[in-house]
Amino acid sequence: MLQLRSVTKRYGSLVALNDVSLTIARGEFFGLLGPNGAGKSTLMSLVAGLRAPDTGSLTLDGVPITAADPSTRVTLGLVPQHVALYPELTADENLRIFGALYGLRGADLRARIDAALEAVQLTDRRRDPVKAYSGGMQRRLNLVAALLHRPKLLLCDEPTVGIDPQSRNAIFEYLERLNRDGLTIIYSTHYMEEATRLCSRIGIIDHGKLPALGTLDELLAQLPFEEEIRFPATAATAPLAAQLASRGECTSENDTHRFRPHPEFKLSAFFTLAESHALPGRLFTSQRPSLEAVFLHLTGRNLRE
Ligand SMILES: Nc1ncnc2c1ncn2[C@@H]1O[C@H](COP(=O)(O)OP(=O)(O)O)[C@@H](O)[C@H]1O
Ligand SMILES: [Mg+2]
């Protein structure tokens, strides 16, 4: 449905997207996972036709994406990273404006607005000005505003930043339902939990590049280890941690060591080593690594930095 070929975008001397190629199939729930400044919003704005790439091409159903082409606008919905609503106006009034931009009016528009407000549980607040809404309510309205014209591809740019868990869940469930009903979604986030829960395929983005792309399982399979071992960082475990450095990656955070063994360093050898330091087995937990580990492995940085 969507194809990016060797797309590069610069702002002056800053390369915001660096030779990015990507294909998204109809029906995908695609996650763009990366920290602040990675290039997520830039990629979204290019797909939405709001900006043009310096080099490379973007096509939607085989047709080049350009801001001038109205078919791009009709096929796409963009939920911008920053809430784009009129604060003085009510939810109803905001949605009427968004609908009118897409040529919707009359009974059809009213029915779509009713359904949209119902879907994100804002019906009883529809006549209140948006400035009186909580952040989560504004985010929910911002989302349905992009859907009134029933696009085939929805771009969600960090739609849950800074909202309460209840609104976050409402947004997740709504997006999952839309995707089941056939909507293709590109969802950007810096929360690996969101990408893990929602997305059928994930692209890791960092410094304008996509160093990895695949399903969660495919991304985890890129790691040179299958288990992560955690144990408390104390004076007693310090000598062990020091020895592990040459046998894998050992990092520590919040008083916990995380050890990712090199493939040739087996779990049995690990416990022999722990025993030689007189450390009991109950100190150690092993778990399947997360996307955080994939990000660290690929970029050498933590997602949260
Ligand atoms: N309009 C702009 N002018 C100059 N630099 C920009 C502009 N928009 C973004 N950037 C820079 O481009 C890089 C990518 O930004 P952005 O796409 O917003 O990343 P993300 O959405 O992943 O946080 C960042 O270094 C950012 O500072
Ligand atoms: Mg952004």
Image: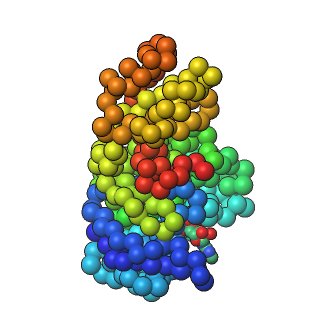
Residue 156 appears in the rendering: no
Which of the 4 quarters of the picture holds residue 47? bottom left
Location of residue 95 with respect to 263 vertically, above or below: below
Residue 294 image point, x, y percent? 41, 48
Front-most of residues 77 and 195? 195
- Quadrant housing the N terminus: bottom left
Residue shown at 39%/72% (left/top)? 20
Location of residue 60 with respect to 41 vertically, above or below: below
Residue 287 image point, x, y percent? 39, 29
Residue 183 image point, x, y percent? 33, 57
Front-most of residues 105 and 66? 66
Location of residue 125 with respect to 205 vertically, above or below: above
Please say which color scheme the image uses.
rainbow
Residue shown at 31%/30% (left/top)? 266
Residue shown at 37%/54% (left/top)? 202
Residue 112 image point, x, y percent? 45, 58
| Quarter of the image where ligand 1 sits | bottom right
Front-most of residues 266 and 218? 266
Which of the 4 quarters of the picture holds residue 82? bottom right
Which of the 4 quarters of the picture holds residue 217? top left
